[in-house]
Image (tube, rainbow, N blue to C red):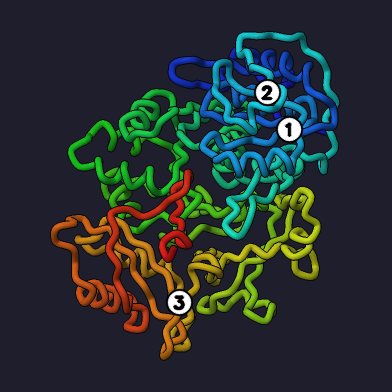
Amino acid sequence: MTPLLPTLSAAVPPDRPAARFDGLTLSHAALAGAARAVAEGLTPGRPVAVWATPSPETVVAVAAALLAGVPAVPLNPKSGDAELAHILGDSAPAALLAAPGAGLPGPAAALPRTDVDIAARAPGTQYPEPPDEAPALIVYTSGTTGPPKGAVLPRRAIRANLDALADAWQWTRDDVLVHALPLFHVHGLILGVLGPLRRGAAFHHLGRFSPGAAAEALAGEGTMLFGVPTMYHRIAAELDGDERLVRALAGARLLVSGSAALPAPDREAIARATGRRVVERYGMTETLMNTSVRLDDADAPPGTVGTPLAGVELRLVDDAGAELPPDDAESVGEIQLRGPNLFTGYLNRPDATAAAFAPGGWFRTGDMATRDADGRVRIVGRRATDLIKSGGYKIGAGEIENALLGHPGVREAAVTGEPDPDLGERIVAWIVPADPASPPTADALAGHVAALLAPHKRPRVVRYLTALPRNDMGKILKRSLHA
């Protein structure tokens, strides 16, 4: 069986760069040596918590857990005490790995602590590769409907998913990935760290994102950029007059956006200025990545998230659970999935695990989408927050948000539904105006949307905000809007 991370074996030339943080570069050999030093102190069979700051210590800690075959539980350093106490009580880690000097809040400080020394080296102890179904990571979901649940991700899922992405994106050991994503989430940790390490390639973590820092890294050795829409929004806003940023993006081999839908105005601005499209993909904690626009799919319509990755089965079902015909490009259905990319279940929650699957082993995503004749998926939104049933129509919030963002008076936009005695639900637009002193009127926004989409998709209510509530990955927290 091939190791999950060739970095930790002899398969990668030892002097090749692996990870770069703020001027510090770890070679594959240095990373392997430091990981072995940490792995020697881990308790077999017990999870280990990782204080997942954007640092080389986090990378070494996760690599050590994977090497030793113990599940790693990445912790968000911004979590509150109540959330941390729940996660640590649920996962029962034997210890916590952290960078030296990192301050830990009460629930985390109560655990036995191991400081990760990235300069330490241990000899090449041979650790057997664990079985495919052995848990590699326990990643806690956002907990929007209750306390966070621990999604148990087996080694099989990570291996299969990263190899499928390498196929879709033509990812090789010669690539250098640039990103500034959090390392407690699957986007930043699995795609952004384990992805390059599985290829024997390198990544450059910027620490804190800025368009200038991204441009500098891409103008150097960087070939790929992974980001979230808020990052690309900042890039799009600075393209005019910044020739260095334009040249850096134009020279990149691959630009990828994920974790939320990329607004059309930002996508189009980047394409106009650089000649490069931003590739979108779709995934979630429990499934890793499900679909992506392939690098060789030049005809992929803007705004789609591509076709299912190798090994992933995807179907759309209606409200009664009946599968929609593959050639039905108009109907909206819930995405259900099967494949090697799926998690094995929620830790200590057999009830939640059972509820997450439909008969036949199909995972219920709760995401609504359409699919064209070529199998390309277009996400409409979450069933709970983004599917609006108004006047007999099923309306996706995402397309209305994109239409609103095309209005010159709108800087940010979110769309939700709220009860209406006549329509069932009415469409509500939450707007951050470009000029707070002179916001666009509700009638102007309704007319703008009706002209671009259809009259029944126009917002009936407009509410103005100074900022939209977002999580660490840039996703809009729609439940907080109504609260």
Mark 3 touches mark 2? (CB < 8 Å): no
Name the quadrant of the N terminus: top right
Residue 112 seen in render: yes
Which label sits on residue 7?
2
The quadrant in which residue 375 appears is: bottom right
Which label sits on residue 242?
none
Q: Residues within 10 Å of mark 2 (few under 14, many from 20)?
A: many
Q: Earlier in the sequence, mark 3 or mark 2?
A: 2
Image position of 256 (left or right of 413) = right
Q: Which residue corresponds to mark 3? A: 395
Q: Earlier in the sequence, mark 1 or mark 3?
A: 1
User: How far apart, in angstroms, are the residues tagged by discs 1 and 3?
Assistant: 42 Å
Q: Which residue corresponds to mark 1? A: 4
Q: How many marks?
A: 3
Q: Residue at (44%, 16%) from the top-left corner?
A: 23
Give the amino acid type for the residue marked by disc 3 in the picture: Ile
